[in-house]
Amino acid sequence: MDVQTNSLFQRHTDHVWQATQRAAQHNRASTGESESQNPFAKLLTQGVQQVNDAEVDSNKKIEQLLSGEDINQAEVFTSIQKADMSFRLLVQIRNKLLQAFEELNGIRV
Amino acid sequence: MISSLDISTSALVAQRTRLNTISGNIANMSTIKNEDGENKPYQPRFVVFQTDEEKTEGGASGVKVSRVETDDVEPVYRYQPEHPMAITEGKWKGYVAYPNIDMNEQFVDALEASRAYEANVGIIEVTKGMSRQTLSILA
């Protein structure tokens, strides 16, 4: 289950990343801004990183619980729920982003 | 949203610890020797809760177990002169000292811990529901 979640997560992250890159290129083309100064892409990458951290943390806690370490079930389930919540938010943001990109892409010049 | 999850979880952990001490009290209801093997009856334990500064955000605080206290109550004496642990001299000669644990009190405490646990799980449900509803703005 772990592997599936992670690969799914990776796919989503890749999508978001590609979309961000494309958006960044568009941005650069129009404003002449350099990549490192793009605050939106940075923000998004940070968000993805945080979601990944939550996922890694919950994975660690599940491992501790299953290997019989002294950890409360409530803590484990809460960290899973946190990871789930942030992941759902990420997916929604990605959907919104792609939707906006598709719409922009559909515009005939 | 996430910090309210943390606060509820801290309460769940604290109530679990409380239930642990209650289990210990019930388990040791007839224990007449202490950890060091001395002839001292078990003394009931109870938890002391404290607000948790680490989980404090915007005026709301989590909870943690400050310490587990050991009670100091007079034991219950039972006349058992044939018992190997019977007191050999003094006022209580021929008696055996047993722990003074009120089972009713312990069970009411356990029930309270269980209800508090339930309430905090309920709050987690509410938090989850709010988070889901918030996402529907975006979708």
Image (spheres, coloured by chain):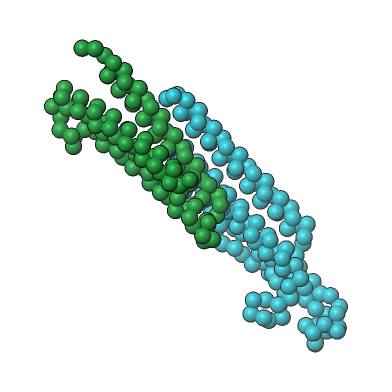
Chain colours: A green, B cyan
What x and y, as percent, mark residue B112? Answer: 69, 49
Answer whether residue A44 is visible to the viewer in this image: no
**Along the line of sight, which residue is nearer the eye, B86 or B135?**
B135
Left of A41 or right of it: where is B8?
Answer: right
Identify the residue shown where x is 68% and y is 60%. Answer: B22
Q: From the viewer's perspective, is residue B99 above or below residue A20?
A: below
What x and y, as percent, mark residue A17? Answer: 29, 34
**Along the line of sight, which residue is nearer the eye, B32 or A21?**
A21
Q: How many labels does the image show?
A: 0
Q: Which residue lies furthest to the top in this view?
A: A109
Residue A31 appears in which quarter of the rendering? Answer: top left
On the rendered image, what quadrant is the C terminus of chain A found in?
top left
Identify the residue shown where x is 53% and y is 47%. Answer: A77
Q: From the viewer's perspective, is residue B132 above or below residue A74?
A: above
Residue A55 appears in which quarter of the rendering? Answer: top left
What x and y, as percent, mark residue B25? Answer: 70, 64
Q: Which residue lies furthest to the left in this view?
A: A32
Identify the residue shown where x is 33% and y is 42%. Answer: A49
Left of B57 or right of it: where is B65?
Answer: right
Identify the residue shown where x is 40% and y is 32%. Answer: A91
